[in-house]
Amino acid sequence: MSVPTVPPIAALLLAAGASSRLGEPKQLLRDIDGTLLITRLATSALAAGLSPVVVVLGANADAVRDSLSTLPVQIVNNAEWQQGMATSIHVGLRALMQEPVQAVLLMACDQPAVTTQHLQSLRERFAHEAGRVASAYAGVHGIPAVWPRSDWPAMMALSGDRGARSLLDGSESAVPLVHGDLDVDTPQDLAIWRDLGLPAV
């Protein structure tokens, strides 16, 4: 049986938050290999064949931008990042409107369980089904997730801190992601991440 060609998919990596509950920029946390979390996630998106890779910055923008300086990613600034995650989604999608891509794979900068292999699996599932493809963890569907262009208007209509996960209803295709429910939002989350020793791949 022939395998369908994987259509062009962009990555949108949200990295604008201030990490107020954590007390330090989560984007600049280091994994077990000493690699910055934001750098590893952007590298994984590139290695998975996603293009372009757009990174949305806000708080701590200069330091995060420096950490990405050696990677071929497109950086956009969200001047309204304090108004919620939806504004970062809007800024990122506007940067992609003229790109010849069929979908966007939405990622957050605080999910250390995400790997290149998982992102590739999401891409390949989208090639077979051409609809939304989410990650499955802790009994729910969430991001990273692939959104076809037909969903972008609904994403542009989000407001405040309402992220794209609110548009998932559980009926979409999904790929399991072990420890996908771990968001590094607090010192306790950081301790869990360190204890798990998640691989930097």
Image: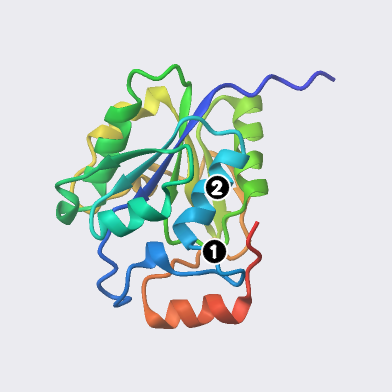
Depicted 58 relative to depicted 97: above or below: below
Label at residue 196: none
On the image, numbered disc 2 is attached to which residue? Answer: 43
Q: Quadrant of the C terminus?
A: bottom right
Question: Residue 180 at x, y = what percent?
Answer: 54, 61
Protein image colouring = rainbow
Question: Residue 118 at x, y = what percent?
Answer: 63, 48
Residue at x 37%, y 77% (from the top left corner): 186
Front residue of 66/21: it is 66
* 97 relative to 177 in the view: left or right: left
Q: Amino acid at mark 1?
A: Thr
**1 and 2 marks in contact (CB < 8 Å):** yes
* 2 relative to 51 in the view: left or right: right
Front residue of 159/70: it is 70
Depicted 186 relative to depicted 25: above or below: below
Depicted 153 relative to depicted 78: above or below: above
Helix, strand or loop at label 2? It is helix
Q: Dot 1, how many residues are within 10 Å of its Cα: few (below 14), some (14-19), or many (20+)?
A: some
Separation of residues labelled 1 and 2 (CA atoms): 10 Å
Helix, strand or loop at label 1? It is loop
Q: Dot 2, how many residues are within 10 Å of its Cα: few (below 14), some (14-19), or many (20+)?
A: some
Q: Quadrant of residue 22?
A: bottom left
Q: Amino acid at mark 2?
A: Thr
The number of numbered discs placed on residues in the rendered structure image is 2
Residue at x 40%, y 20% (from the top left corner): 99
On the image, numbered disc 1 is attached to which residue? Answer: 35
* 200 relative to 68 in the view: left or right: right
Residue at x 23%, y 52% (from the top left corner): 58
Question: Residue 136 at x, y = what percent?
Answer: 57, 53
Q: Quadrant of the N terminus?
A: top right
Q: Please tell me which of labels 1 and 2 falls first in the chain.
A: 1
